Amino acid sequence: MTRYASLADFVTVSTDAYDVVREILLEDAGRPPDPGRDVGVDQGTLLQAIVAVGSGDARLFAPVVPAAERQVAEIDRTSPAKVQPNLSVLNVLSELQLMGVAVPEETVRTATGWLAGMRTAGMEPRWMHWNRGLAALAMGDLPTARTIAALPADGSGEADPDVSPGYSIQAWFAVFVVAVERRLPWSAMRPRWEEYLTELPGFIEVGEQSAVDLAWVGRIVGHLVAGVPLGQVADWIHAEVHRVASAGA
């Protein structure tokens, strides 16, 4: 697991890594895409692109879509309850949407349907459990999200966004669930979003989060709370991460 000294370090490392990959993507831009490739391997590169340039290179990732459609159909036919590569593929579908790349709604719905049947509690690495929960919340599977957040299925339960969740990822996730369910205004969640970004490098270091979780939290807070159009969320995340990193530098 990569260690980051701060959010600013996370931004720098992600941007530098993407600069290298971008050269390869540009070289491959004129070649026919491989329809049989595992698109899940692109989840990290897409996150780095979002941090580095927002949606600026969306066109370079559009060729991933046909392979994603094929892989989703194959997974749904053979192994819809598996955790991996299923989670990684869904991560990619969402990241593409955040960049404004058109992904068939049926493909996204099919992949979202896998979340309820996965068994991630207690598995290693731990971030996959929370990644599943964030995905469920972002994609509208509230029963699965509430279960992972340890909130009662009847809609009750308390998580106060005015209070820092500290270093408990479960407490953080419960706050995100409550924010979505109560339709909290962006002004109420902005302090928690900024705090989450600041704490993200530490959560990654201890294995509670992965860098790709930033895209899900950005979708939840940016799209569902702040009301940013889905296809503009990558640019919003890019701007917000750089703003908060600069403020904390």
Image (cartoon, rainbow, N blue to C red):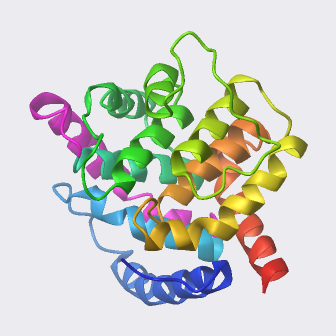
Q: What's the residue at 44%, 90% (across, down)?
A: 20
Note whether 151 is above or below 215 in the view shown: above
Judge by depth and name the residue closer to the eye, 50 or 34: 50
Could you tell me residue 162's position as x and y percent?
A: 83, 43
Judge by depth and name the residue closer to the eye, 236 or 213: 213
Could you tell me residue 55's position as x and y percent?
A: 62, 63
Q: Which residues are magenta?
A: 54-83
Helix, strand or loop: magenta stretch:
helix
Which residue extends farthest right?
Answer: 187
Note whether 202 is above or below 117 in the view shown: below
Judge by depth and name the residue closer to the eye, 212 or 206: 206
- The answer to whether residue 24 is left or right of residue 50 is left
Note whether 233 is above or below 76 in the view shown: below
Q: What's the residue at 44%, 57% (across, down)?
A: 62
Could you tell me residue 58's position as x and y percent?
A: 54, 63
Q: How many numbered marks, from 0 up?
A: 0
Q: Quadrant of residue 144?
A: top left
User: Can residue 100 be seen from the camera position used here?
Assistant: no
Quadrant where the image shows the C terminus:
bottom right
Quadrant where the image shows the N terminus:
bottom left
Task: Please say whether residue 190 is one of the residues in the magenta stretch.
Answer: no
Q: What's the residue at 84%, 78% (across, down)?
A: 247
Q: Quadrant of residue 191?
A: bottom right
- The answer to whether residue 187 is left or right of residue 245 is right
Which residue extends farthest top?
Answer: 154
User: Can residue 245 be seen from the camera position used here?
Assistant: yes
Task: Please say whether residue 81 is one of the residues in the magenta stretch.
Answer: yes
Could you tell me residue 157's position as x and y percent?
A: 63, 21
- The answer to whether residue 243 is left or right of residue 147 is right
